[in-house]
Amino acid sequence: MMIDLMRRALPDGETLPRLYYEAKRVRQGLGFRYESIHACKNDCVLFWKEQADKEECPQCKTSRWSNVKGSGKKIPQKVLLYFPIKPRLQRLFMSKDTAKNMRWHKDERQHDDNALRHPTDSIVWKEFDKEHDWFAQDSRNVRLGLASDGFNPFGNMSTSYSIWPVVLMPYNLPPWKCMKDPHIMLLLLIPGPTAPGNEIDVYLRPLVDDLHELWNEGVITYDALTQQTFKLHAALLWTINDFPAYANLSGWSTKGKLGCPVCNKDTTYKWLKYGGKVCYMGHRRFLPQGHVWRKNKSLFDGTEEHRMKPKELSGDQLLQQLMHVTDVQFGKVCGTKRKRTDDELNWMKKSIFFKLPYWSTLKLRRNLDVMHIEKNICDSVLGTLMNIDGKTKDTAKARMDLYEMGIRKELHLQTNGAARSMLLAKYTLTQDEKKTLCDWLKGVKFPDGYASNIGRCVNKLPSKISGMKSHDCHVFLQCLLPIAICGY
């Protein structure tokens, strides 16, 4: 009905497809196709390649199909959508302009002053070129970055659902194009309703298999700029994600006593008795020797810090640790949770990316999404300053932990017989100060395109700030908060 309505609105001689299926055939002719791969309900395996003919999961014995009464057609429990990477990369060279831009990182980059303007200026890129010079010789070979995170496609509705898209960015393009929408390639749509978690490797297998083939064998590609064919190779340089997704993609758990993936087995942790959580206190090791905060006892854990920062582990050292991680079976089946041994440290699995021949030699494999993390920090800072319920970190249990550690005596709970009171901290705004801050934010103006209207996120009665997006939080922390503090 929608297509018929659009056809009637167009002038005579229009060639719009008459049926939805005709439109799909046009799309398939352009190469915009995808593969529907059935998956186990419990995320154990994909019914693909050697498992393609199975009617039930070989591990949990769950049926491949959902039981729908009164329906003669079999409906799969879960369906992974995979958009093959090879035709996507080949299409980048079908246009002369895009084919020229795919050589920008080598042929047109002019700056070489150790400033990081593009991934090609990074140490990772340069070290990769030295180790794999055959790959670097042809500027058309593609360097890729992978990003993934979960979101609810139903918006703010009450439905609890998490779907995980996996996207790739080609870094051959200049910096003003490589991260734009037209060049970000959707490769996988991992179905819900729950997040894949540690089982994300099951769904990444089709992509990793194609990346392995693109590295070893390549694919014949037509270059519109030279009007010749060449063998295209591709390499995945790193992943981009927030901290929880870091654990899913890397295989190192970011929770517990060894939650820091950088410090590895040398992580400094402390159990907070009243807060009931683990905190990590070794961050002063990364400061320069002689820094004043290394000797400061009152602001941290009551001790001085004289240790050097942890040594960076090489790929061979990581592989030696992963040799102890065995018998990992994927799947969310009740009662089959695997316990880690002491030798396994915090490793939950050996990441599927280690199947790529070059992955263990990369200097940097994981990047954290700074804007995502910055939003969480901004919410916590605002919640603590304005004492917003559910957002503040200044709680009675936190004050009791400070007393247990023997630091920040001015923040300890005050005891009066059987009653306890919590004094207002210096950093907590009074009601008048909250109102002044909200009035000021309500009237702040920005240049066009610099930031959104943050005043819409301010609620004067009660004095509250909520609903800021990631970029708004970045602007608030970098610009507005320092100005507000200087004003006070």
Image (cartoon, rainbow, N blue to C red):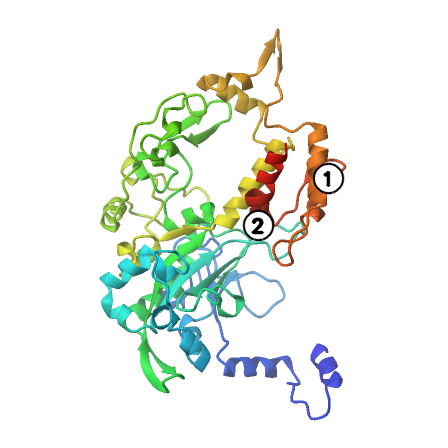
Residue 193 at x, y = what percent?
Answer: 56, 53
Describe the element under mark 2 as helix, strand or loop.
helix
Determine whether 144 is above or below 20 in the image: above
Residue 336 at x, y = what percent?
Answer: 41, 43
Front-most of 332 and 344? 344
Front-most of 39 and 252? 252
Describe the element under mark 1 as helix, strand or loop.
helix
Which of pointers 1 and 2 indicates the residue nearer the eye?
Answer: 1
Using the image, tell me which numbered label, if any, was put on residue 470.
2
Residue 315 at x, y = what percent?
Answer: 26, 50
**View extreme (right): residue:** 461
Residue 16: which quarter of the image? bottom right
- Amino acid carrying mark 1 in the image: Asp
- For label 1, the residue is 439
Q: CA distance from mark 1 to mark 2?
A: 22 Å
Determine whether 99 is above or below 356 in the image: below
Residue 275 at x, y = what percent?
Answer: 51, 26
Determine whether 41 is above or below 425 in the image: below
